[in-house]
Amino acid sequence: MNNVNIATRIIGVNFDKKGQANVVLWAPEVQQAEIVILSLDQSIPLVRKEHGYWTLTTNALKAGELYRFILDGNEQFPDPVSLSQPDGVHGASQAMDITSFEWSDQNWKNHPLKNFIIYELHTGTFTTKGTFACLEDKLDYLIDLGVTAIEIMPVAQFSGDRNWGYDGVFPFCVQNSYGGAESLQHLVDTCHDKGLAVILDVVFNHIGPEGNHLESFGPYFTDKYHTPWGNAINFDDSWCDGVRQFYIENTLMWFRDFHIDALRMDAVHAIKDFSPVHILKEIKEHVDQLMQETGRRYYLIAELDLNDTRFINAIDKGGYGMDSQWIDEFHHALRVSSGQERSGYYSDFDGITSLAKSFQDAYVYDGQYSDHRKKRFGIKASDNPGQQFVVFSQNHDQVGNRMLGERTSELVSPEMQKLLAGAVFISPYIPMLFMGEEYGETNRFQYFVSHTDPELAEAVRKGRKKEFEAFHREGQAPDPMGEETFINSKLQWELTDKETHKTLLSYYTKLIEIRKQQPAIHVLNRKELSVECNVEQKIIILHRQYKIQDIICLMNFSRKAQQIRVPVYAPVWSKLLASSDKKWNGPTDLPESVSEELSLVLPPESFTIYTNMYE
């Protein structure tokens, strides 16, 4: 073992063309391993192989059968590489042939990463029923909006049927209450038919608490390093080869067997690995091999709380080869620019000064002293193209990790909402929306779980209360175990037909259209960009160029009208968009064209774009 087969899954239960089940279990420290087939009430011993693997080839186990493993003749456990848990995390595993789905996307070609316009969503709260099948019913809406890729929050099997997804305990298994593996495959197939790429959020830095039996099988964790979730995943300690294969095979499965187009890798800064070849680099090398074999393009997008280009630099330049990363600093600077609080990690950001720097340099901190971190932080990202950074005005973390889960629509004015959206879409980076922001969803997105272990459930309640004990003057943190917390986080689709939500939706649609059609915005060239900010006026002027096109973007973050003059000459400047126009429920219309230099009075909290080329 330990030699990953790019073409097919090796570990777990898999079926060959003759219908035989090939069973491979990694349990390096046990003396005996058996598989018990529930319908036959029969156990079959596995054969020990090298490096801690146990194997079996049998006709007794059929697709659809329930099974468990018995270790050292004692307790029974579900398969850590299970593809299906029909009765939840505590139930038996179900054998399935992951390759039996009949795909119709043979002609699908993934979008270039630079063309991604991402829409992050949570399956359980995106629709009333919270399933992949119901999600399919909303794909045409997303296409009309103009997004090119959906990003699905984690779907690995978790306890109960309500969870953000970051408590998954079966990384290979698709949540049963969402519809399971075949339903996810059908969703991806449908997305490809409609021209949408699919990004899946995966968690390789920890395993959830309830139903987590990995330590019974082997040293999946190490006490060498501590993470916010306990002992770290074992990527570089004794017996780490089996753990590394586990996550490499998981990555390949999503791309090869589910036709996922990109993985968003949660909090990779919490992955601890001092091996000669970092696990992310090794994953990337295997993905590159898979791309050569399939002829398809796959992307790895990292969530990273380190301004360290080593993660996103190419392997041949000494990096780990991640294709892109989330850049929270753009969000933090944007949030402070909008007048929201500067507590916690937001205290490091100076509003429009920081935002202007992020437009220019991606990282706000690229070697300066961070007062919040109490150290110098970050390195410069001068040579990294714009497509290597994903930006947003809100996401699941920045909304749901607030005590009350308030969305931006509750925290700022309607005019500021339009300005924040404009700042994201005018950037030279990949834009991402969080579900519902495009029409100003008013339901909060709160933290919810549905653990069935009473002690764990109470511990989560107490932990959530303690986390926000300094904020009690603002109310109590919602009960994460309460079903109402989950239900109250669902989108209200009826709002899209009501004012002012309908107009905001049209505004977002127009923003995305401009993003796609205007070369100076669409081409993510960080070199042909200049930015200036006026701290006193709270104005940012962003100038983007491509060949003979110039685009001037004017952002007024103040609550007052501001006179501006932009000394960039053009015979005629034509308006592409002004958030203050009455058609967008704004207070005043700005002129359709301006001659020579741009001289305007910018309305409060407004976003305005003019170009020297407009057809």
Image (cartoon, rainbow, N blue to C red):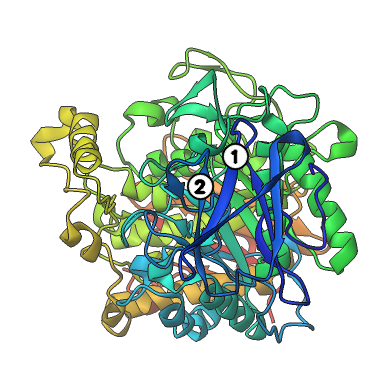
Q: Residues within 10 Å of mark 2 (few under 14, many from 20)?
A: many
Q: Nearer the viewer, residue 7 or 517?
A: 7
Q: Which amino acid type corresponds to the residue marked 1 in the rendered image?
A: Gln
Q: Is residue 535 left or right of residue 532?
A: left
- Asked if marks 1 and 2 touch (Cβ < 8 Å), the reply is yes
Position of the C terminus by quadrant: bottom right
The residues tagged by marks 1 and 2 sit, at their Cα atoms, a distance apart of 8 Å
Image vertical order of residue 531 relative to residue 578, above or below? above
Task: Residue at 68% x, 25% y: name it.
Answer: 236
Residue 242 at what x, y percent from top left?
69, 38
User: Is residue 209 positioned above or below 393 on the image?
Assistant: above
Q: Quarter of the image for the N terminus: give it.
A: top right
Residue 27 is situated, as x and y percent measured from the top left of the image, at 62, 38
Label 1, residues with CA under 10 Å away: few <14, some 14-19, many ≥20: some
Residue 246 at what x, y percent from top left?
66, 45
Residue bearing the label numbered 2: 70
Which numbered disc flags the more N-terminal residue, 1 or 2? 1
Q: Amino acid at mark 2?
A: Ile
Residue on which the image places disc 1: 32
The quadrant holding residue 122 is bottom left
Is residue 582 visible to the viewer in this orientation of the structure? no
Left or right placement of residue 448 versus residue 58 in this view? left
